[in-house]
Image (cartoon, rainbow, N blue to C red):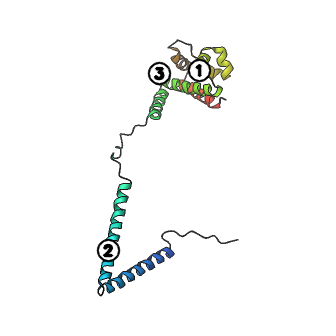
Amino acid sequence: MGHLRVPESADSPQSTRSETIALVVLAVTIGVLLYFAGFSGSTQWILGVSSLTVFALFAGILILRRTAEPAPLVGPAAPGAIHGGEFESLAAAVKRASRGLVYSQVQVASRARAAFVERVRLGIALSPEAMRDVQGDPVQIRRVIHDEVLEDFVKIRIGDLDERYRWVIEARERGSFVREFREVLARMEAWR
């Protein structure tokens, strides 16, 4: 078996040693140049221009780094001011529905019905209008869905505004909206 070579990290002893050597060489070079600068005017000029160049590069790097990615103008949101959006409102409606509030039960059932109908519609490649017709016809809905519980959950009589509430009322009369709705959700997940 061959030996595995571990890549060197930035804090490895070899990189620290090479950085130290580079700093010593730089210090010796600057020391020699400063020594010769005492005897030569041209060396003084070279050191002065080099120092200004290094200072300008350092200042330029600092300025570019700070202006490349400016801090956002808007501060962080306050801890209590975050709005969760649709999922948070749906989760709250589900909690209220599980506590027995009728309006929330109707809201949750309507959202689940709409999502499932859309899934069925896309699965069988129907237009929204054609799917609405399927929902209103018990024969067509049976041909498409093949599940009595889901058929009952999805069917809507066209033009009947109270039909949206029909399933919730019947589920409550059968004993428990939560139990009935869980069964519908399980069948929705299994539907193909």
Q: Is residue 177 left or right of residue 45?
A: right
- Spatial CA distance of label 3 from label 1 is 19 Å
Vertical placement of 26 versus 136: above or below?
below
Of circles 1 and 2, the one toward us is 2
Residue at 35 percent across and 44 percent down: it is 77
Circle number at residue 111: none
Residue linked to disc 3: 102
Q: Position of residue 54 (x, y in %)?
A: 35, 71
The amino acid marked with disc number 1 is Val
Of circles 3 and 2, the one toward us is 2
Residue linked to disc 1: 154
Quadrant that contains the C terminus: top right
**Which class describes the residues within 10 Å of circle 3: few (<14), some (14-19), or many (20+)?**
some
**Which class describes the residues within 10 Å of circle 1: few (<14), some (14-19), or many (20+)?**
many
Say which element carries label 2: helix
Vertical placement of 110 versus 30: above or below?
above
Splitting the image into 4 quarters, where does residue 74 fall?
top left
Observer-nearest of 124 and 135: 124
Q: Residue furthest right?
A: 1
The amino acid marked with disc number 2 is Val
- Spatial CA distance of label 1 from label 2 is 83 Å
Q: Position of residue 179 (x, y in %)?
A: 57, 27
Q: Residue furthest bottom?
A: 39
Of circles 3 and 1, the one toward us is 1
Vertical placement of 37 versus 98: above or below?
below
Say which element carries label 1: helix
Residue at 56 percent across and 26 percent down: it is 181
